[in-house]
Image (spheres, helix red, strand yellow):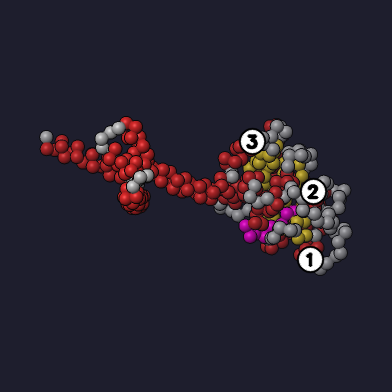
Amino acid sequence: MKKEVIAHKDPKSPISEIFRTLRTNIQFINTNKKTKTLLVTSTLPGEGKSWIASNLAVTFAQTGKKVVLIDADMRKGRQYGIFDIPPTPGLSNYLSEIGIPKKENISEEIIACIRKTEVPNLYVMPAGSIPPNPSELLVSPKMLKLLEKCKQVFDITIIDGTPCELVTDAVILSRIVDSTIIVTAHKLTKKDALERVIKNIQNVGGNLTGVVVNKMPISGKKYEKQYYYYGDSSRKLEIEPTNLEIEKPKEIKQETTEKPNKTTTKKTTTKKSTTETKQTKPKTNSKTATKATKTTKSTTNETNVSDEKKSEETTKEERTSDILKQMNEYLNKEKGEKND
């Protein structure tokens, strides 16, 4: 399987997330009727039709649904190369009854042309041999029987059609499928060509679901902002509480430093204040007398124990202390106004 199947190779990528949004839009766009058969076409070659069809089929299979991807581009099919499966027998061999052994049941002939893939619940029917009359084969009653059997066995059938501007194969298929999607490319698809394709499908009676714009230029920064937050949300939840825990002790330390500590005593000795010189005296006498050292150690231990107790109390109460102060001030103002 090639790297083109991004929905299977890298399911957490932003491109895979885009295909999931496309899947949900297809599922909920027709609420009254379930889409069992879906045609993917384009205006011209090179717009990414086969790539979108393959990844869309993978996203449907990832939900647990049984999906079959039919490559109806019998002139230039690409699904066998994307999923690395044998190209024959395929759709053309089943419709023309050439290249496959004749069997009694039609279901056995269909099974002989379907291949398993690496993706669970996903099966692919390649285009098969190149026939001389692919448009006539698609109109045959065997094509209708194929879709009926696929509806009975599989949950959804995705058909990779041909470009509508070159041949009419996809326009023919749009009549017999439930819904149709047109793939366009940024700065490649012309507006006039898209309008012609839409009119052709509507004139035939096809149900057009919508238009997919491919190859849009988007920078990596927009991808990170829009899609990568799913993967980084768990990391943000782990980081934010730690930041809060780091900020709270800083506030507690600032409040405790306002009380008499070593830093305040050093500053007061230079200023020679009468209140704080008393605390610095035991430190100056500690070098000469052992009694003074014992007293200073006991005082420091007491202060450390008191600081630890206060820090434990403040962690529980200081979250609401500012709010309580504001409420008390507000209540006092109201009482004063009532007394007046």
Q: Earlier in the sequence, mark 3 or mark 1?
A: 1
**Position in image of residue 195 (x %, y %):** 68, 35
Residue at 85% over, 48% down: 133
**Which element is circle 1 on?**
helix
- Magenta highlight on residue 68: yes
Q: Start and end of the magenta stretch?
A: 63-70
The residue singled out by tag 2 in the image is 78
Which residue type does callout 3 highlight? Ser
The reply to whether callout 1 and callout 2 are in contact (CB within 8 Å) is no
Residue at 63% over, 42% down: 210
The residue singled out by tag 3 in the image is 219
| Mark 3: few/some/many CA within 10 Å (<14, 14-19, 20+) | few
Q: In front: mark 2 or mark 3?
A: 3
**Position in image of residue 64 (x %, y %):** 63, 60
Task: Judge left or right: residue 240 versus residue 53.
Answer: left
**Position in image of residue 239 (x %, y %):** 51, 47
The quarter of the rendered structure image containing the C terminus is top left
